[in-house]
Amino acid sequence: MSSPAPSVDRRGLIAAILVGVIGPEVFIVQPGFVQGLVQHLGFDDRSAGYAASIEVWGITATTVLMTFFAHHFNWRKVISVSLILVAVSNFACIVVHDKSLFLALRFVAGLGCGSLISLSFTTVGLTSNPDRNFGYLIMWVLLYGAVVLFAMPAAFAVSGMSGPLLFFALFPLTALPMVKSFPVSGETVAAVEADAVNLSNVLKGSALAAMFAYFIAQGVAWAYLFLIGTAGGLSEQKVANALTLSQFAGVAGALLPAMVGSRFGRWRPLSIGICGGAVALVFLIGRFEYLPFTLWVCVYNFFWNMTHPFLLGSMASFDRRGRVVVYAVALQMLGLAIGPALAASVISPEHYDRVNWLAIGFFMVSWICILPPVLSQQRSTQATKLGWVQRMRCTGVRASGTLDRR
């Protein structure tokens, strides 16, 4: 039997980042996609929202299934089939006219996207510096979203909805030549993140609970941030401008872990990022002017996208085969799907204060849950390094004694 590969190499990382951008190719530009459904395909606001939602649930379904079956399948085959499935589903959406069939195709596309997201994120987690590389991944996803959202109105003007759907069909095919750069499975990678340890199941559960709570909070807040702005007294255009600027703040946030990696540990940046996002939401309660709203939305998006890579990097350090990352990505998508529904259950007419406080509460739960596993992992790696240094010193002493006797 062949020995495991030492780690995911640079070509594998590039392939994982490309597939990691393709996975949420529609999800990340959802506002523009929904606009196209309403303006060019005859959907009303409610049915367009349902079309977007059903794709997210398709993504969620697959990411959850991958937690049980990822280690049983050949990852390269799963990724190849998923890329083709996403391409065919989007091609088919161009030619179908029945809305029920269109919705079914969006769900199928979501199923394919879910496995792409799960396996690309897991592969990045198997690299030697996951904090930095997750930062690059999130940064490229955000840049993709900003560019495509900017281009969608022009595409609609030229080709209606067919142009964007054609792009969403062709983009996945660009990754097919790079599929062979992925590992066959997580079990074939021998060395992962340098500080990876195998934590107890209790601590792994605490870490996954933190991931779930964090993305419930994001789902609660992000889904209603536009309405929070308009309810605070701002025009729709001003809110849209602020949210656009916040995308660039998000890119800057993702760039930070890409630059520093885990050089300063994880519990400090995670504490700053999670608590910073909660503080930003406190300042988005009530009524506000445009500049304060823009500032705090940018702060919120900066901390969100700074925290995300550190969270995923932490998950990669809690076991040595990437399985915790698979579970974490599933809970991430599940949290994003559940969050808006939870927020809707606490809304009062034209008042969104409860939405903010609900998100803040889940942020605090996430912070409390992530600290024990992160600190335990840090202590384990420090003890390992200390033991290594002591062994080296002992070896040096024995070698010196041998030379003296000679």
Image (tube, grey):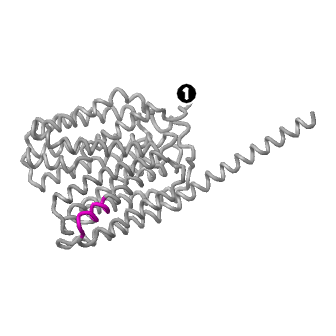
Q: Residue furthest right?
A: 405
Q: Give the extent of the magenta segment.
A: 288-297
Q: Is residue 93 left or right of residue 223?
A: left
Please say whether residue 73 is one of the residues in the magenta stretch.
no
Amino acid type, residue under disc 1 in the picture: Ser
Which of the pair 83/235 is nearer the observer? 235
Quarter of the image for the N terminus: give it. top right
Which of the pair 226/365 is nearer the observer? 226
Neighbours of disc 1 within 10 Å: few (<14), some (14-19), many (20+): few
Residue at position x 34%, y 37% in the image: 19
Residue 269 in the image, given as x and y percentages of width and height: 48, 57
Residue at position x 40%, y 42% in the image: 136
SS for callout 1: loop
Query: In the rendered image of this protein, does residue 93 appear above or below residue 292?
Result: above
Query: In the rendered image of this protein, does residue 317 appear above or below residue 71?
Result: below
Residue at position x 22%, y 37% in the image: 168
Residue at position x 30%, y 36% in the image: 82
Please say whether residue 294 is one of the residues in the magenta stretch.
yes
Residue 105 in the image, given as x and y percentages of width and height: 18, 41
Magenta-colored segment: predominant secondary structure: helix
Residue 53 in the image, given as x and y percentages of width and height: 22, 52
Quarter of the image for the C terminus: give it. top right
Judging by the rendered image, the residue that carries numbered circle 1 is 2
